[in-house]
Amino acid sequence: MSNLGCARNLVDSEVMAGQLAFAGFTIVPAPAEADIIIVNTCSFIASAVDESVDEILELAEFKKTGHCKRLIVAGCLPERFREALAQSLPEVDVFLGTGAYHKITDVLARPEKPGTCLLPPPAAPPLQRHDTRRIPSTSGTVYLKATEGCNRHCTYCMIPGLRGTLRSRTMEDIETEARHLVSAGFKELVVIGQDTGCYGQDLGRDVQSEARLPELLERLAEISPDTWIRFLYGSPDTTDEKLVRAVAAHENICAYFDIPVQHAAGRILKRMGRRYDEDDLFRMVDTIRSIIPEAAIRTTMMVGFPGETDQDFEQMLEFIQTVRFDHLGAFIYSDDKALPSHRLSGHVPEKAAQERHHRLMSAQAEISAEKNQAHIGHVYPVLVEEALEPGLFAGRSFFQAPEVDGIIYIDAENDAAVGEFANVRITDALEYDLRGDTI
C-alpha cells in the first residue's frame, strides 16, 4: 500500500490495512511482491496531483514486472476528478473516492469491471471509532483523528468538497482509542483533523461547551504523564487564551502551535475567505508567547494568490520577519476552475509567484538558522525515531512535529531505544536540523 499526502490520509490507509489484515490478506513490504496494490492519493494542489499520477503509473508497471493483478486507487484524486480519471488511467482497476475507502475489503472480495468508480458522498463512511481495525505504520508516534471534513469556505480550498462538512468524534471515543494506543506503547499522540481547532462545534448545544479542543487535550494529557500530546492543523480564530492555557497547564501537551495563517495582508485574507486580519494575528502570537514564552509556532503561507500585489507580498514578508515563526512552510497558489478563487481578478504570473516563494523561504531559512543556534547548550527530551547508523540516531523534541519540521541527530555512545525518550544536549545547529549528545 502506498500513501500520499497528509497525516489524515495516513490514518485512512492504516484503517484500510487493518481491515485487509482482519479479512485474511497479508501486507507485504515491497510492491513487486504484491498481488494487489493500493494507492491512497492526494489532490489538494497541482503538485500533489502530479505526484499521485506519477506514483500510480510507476506502480502500474508491476502489473508487467511483478505479481500485481489489481491496482486500486483511493482517496482525494478519484474524489476530485471522478469518472474522468478512469478515462485517463486505464491501468487502474478500481477507483475509490474518499467516501468509499472503508469498502476496500468488499471491493477485493468480488471482481469489478476495470475502471470501476465507487464515489459515494464523502460523508458516507462512519466516523472512525476506538474499535475500528487499524495498523499504525509508525513507531513511537501515532496520529489520532478527532474530526473529518470542514465547514469553512476558503476560496482557494476544495477540502469541503473532497471530505465533506465537519464531523467530530465523541470525546469519550477518542479518549478510549488514546488509552489503547498508550497501552500499545506509543509515546506521542498527534491529534489531527481537517480543521482541528473546530473540534466539537458540530456535536450539538448540549455537549458543545464540554467538547472542544482544550477539554479534549486535557483529558488526553491525563491518561499518561509520560506520553506527549500534540495537535496539528489549527486556525487563528480558534487559537484563543483558553486553548493556550490548557497547553500551559500540562507538561506533556507539547507547547507547539501549528496555525496556518496563509497571508498577512487583510485585503488578501478577505479574498481568501479568512476571518481575521494582521492585527488579529499579532494578538494571537502575543497571547501564545505571553503565556508560554518557550512555545514553538509553526505556520503555512501562500504566495501568488489572485490579486496579490508587490505591496501585499512585502507586508507578508515583513510580518514573518517581525513574528519570527519557529517553523514556516509556503506554497504557491494552485489554480483550478472548480475553485471560487479562480474567478477572482488579478491572477499572478507564475514567474512572479515563484520569485516571491523563493524570497519568503530564504527569509525563513535565516530565521530558522538563528532560532536553532539558540538551542545550543540546552537539554531536551527527544523522542528517538530512527537508528541511522551505529551510534547515530534521529529524533524530535517538543518543538518539532513529525514529517514537516527538522530533526535532531543524536550521538549516543550507548544505543538509544527507538520509540523511547532520551535526554539530549544540543551541540550544533544546522539551517533546519540540530545535533546533540545523549546525557
Image (spheres, grey):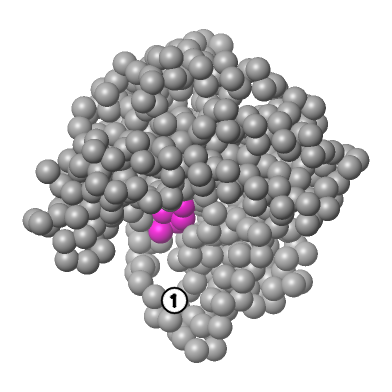
Instruction: State which region is magenta.
Output: 10-17
- One can see residue 206 in this view: yes
Q: What residue type is labelled 1?
A: Pro
Q: Is residue 12 magenta?
A: yes
Q: Going 57% across and 28% down the picture, which residue do you hit?
A: 322
- In what quadrant of the picture does the C terminus appear? top left
Number of residue marks: 1
Give residue 230's position: percent from left, percent from top.
38, 33
Q: Which residue is at the front of the view, 341 or 301?
A: 301
Viewer-closest of 367 and 210: 367
Q: Hey, which quadrant is residue 67 in on the image?
A: bottom left
Kindly identify which residue carries mark 1: 31
Magenta segment main secondary structure: helix
Residue 291 shown left or right of residue 103 in the figure: left
- Residue 404 % position (x, y): 46, 48
Residue 233 in the magenta stretch? The answer is no
Asked whether residue 131 appears in the rendered view, the answer is no
Q: Whole-percent x and y of residue 251? A: 27, 24
Residue 327 in the image: above or below residue 431: above
**Most extreme residue toward the left, as rendered?**
414
Image spot of residue 291 (x, y percent): 40, 14
Name the image quarter holding the N terminus: bottom left
- Residue at (83, 48) in percent of width and height: 348
Q: Compared with residue 124, is residue 268 higher up or lower down, i.e. above or below? A: above
Residue at the (46%, 36%) spot, across then down: 326
**Mark 1, other Cα within 10 Å: few <14 / some 14–19 / many ≥20:** many
- Is 11 or 24 nearer to us in this picture? 11
Q: Residue at left 59%, top 20%? A: 282
Under tag 1, what secondary structure?
A: helix
Left or right: residue 147 versus residue 21 is right
Front residue of 346/13: it is 346
